[in-house]
Amino acid sequence: MRKISTFSGRLQQEYADQLPEKAKLFLEKIANATSRMYAMIDGVLSYSTLNASEQPMARIDLDKIMQHIESDLEVPIQYKKAIINKCNLPEIDGAEVLIYQLFYNLINNSLKFSRSEVAPVITISSSIASKDEKDFAVIEVADNGIGFTGDEAERIFNSFTRLHGKDKYEGTGLGLALCRKIAERHHGFINAAGNEGKGAIFTVWLPLKQDQLTI
């Protein structure tokens, strides 16, 4: 990733007057994506250490988070001819880099575990609900992918759990486990429902407001 950032930056600086506008736009997308990836990696590394509680709290616009994710996943979205439907999403308190990764993992999974004969359709919806005297943003990420059985709905959140072979679907088996840890770190939770061969729905509950300054 460092080399991608370095060489794309050099292209922008040294050949700016020779590049067509479309190429400049692509390089700008690369620069923005690598910048966010660096931030995500730094945040996750911090999260995995004893100092993870020092993640700063910020007001997060979930619409902007989804826009960044769509931009960073532009290549697989276009390759698979995926359709992403989404409503207006709320603002919440949280650690931005972790919230980004939570939803990046969910949307990336929907693209990865799509059915070969059907273009992925990913629907992101939201509502506000109260639980234990707190208001939550309830975000649903639904897809029409390969799904899973009801018996697997909880097991998929275990670390290194893979329901499908590495030869067909790449991945580490850590993505959903990290999603759950991030949701719980924000005093929320995530659950899943699947229909094998028809798709899956992931529901994330995140408090609208947090009391502390770090998380």
Image: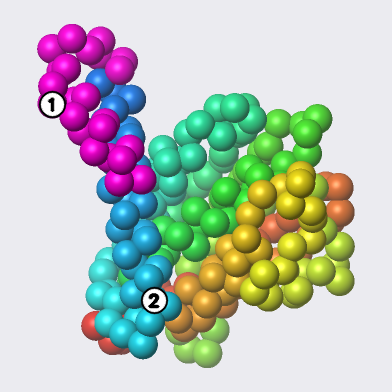
Question: Residue 189's spot in the image, x, y percent?
Answer: 57, 77
Residue at 57%, 38% in the rendered image: 84
Q: Is residue 13 left or right of residue 190?
A: left
The magenta segment: 1-23
Mark identifier at residue 47: 2
Q: Quadrant of the N terminus?
A: top left
Question: What colour scheme was applied to this rendering of the protein?
Answer: rainbow
Question: Residue 63's spot in the image, x, y percent?
Answer: 39, 50
Q: Amino acid at mark 2?
A: Tyr
Quick one: 134 or 111, which is closer to the camera? 111
Residue at 68%, 37% in the rendered image: 120
Q: Amino acid at mark 1?
A: Gln
As for residue 18 lying within the magenta part, the answer is: yes
Quick one: 21 or 202, which is closer to the camera? 21
164 to 177, vertically: above or below = above
Mark identifier at residue 126: none
Q: Quadrant of the C terminus?
A: bottom left
Question: Residue 24's spot in the image, x, y percent?
Answer: 25, 21
40 to 56, vertically: above or below = above
Q: Are marks 1 and 2 in contact (CB under 8 Å)?
A: no
Question: Residue 40's spot in the image, x, y percent?
Answer: 36, 59
Q: Secondary structure at mark 1?
A: helix
Q: Quadrant of residue 22?
A: top left
In primary-sequence order, the first of circles 1 and 2 is: 1
Mark identifier at residue 13: 1
Foreground: disc 1 or disc 2: 1
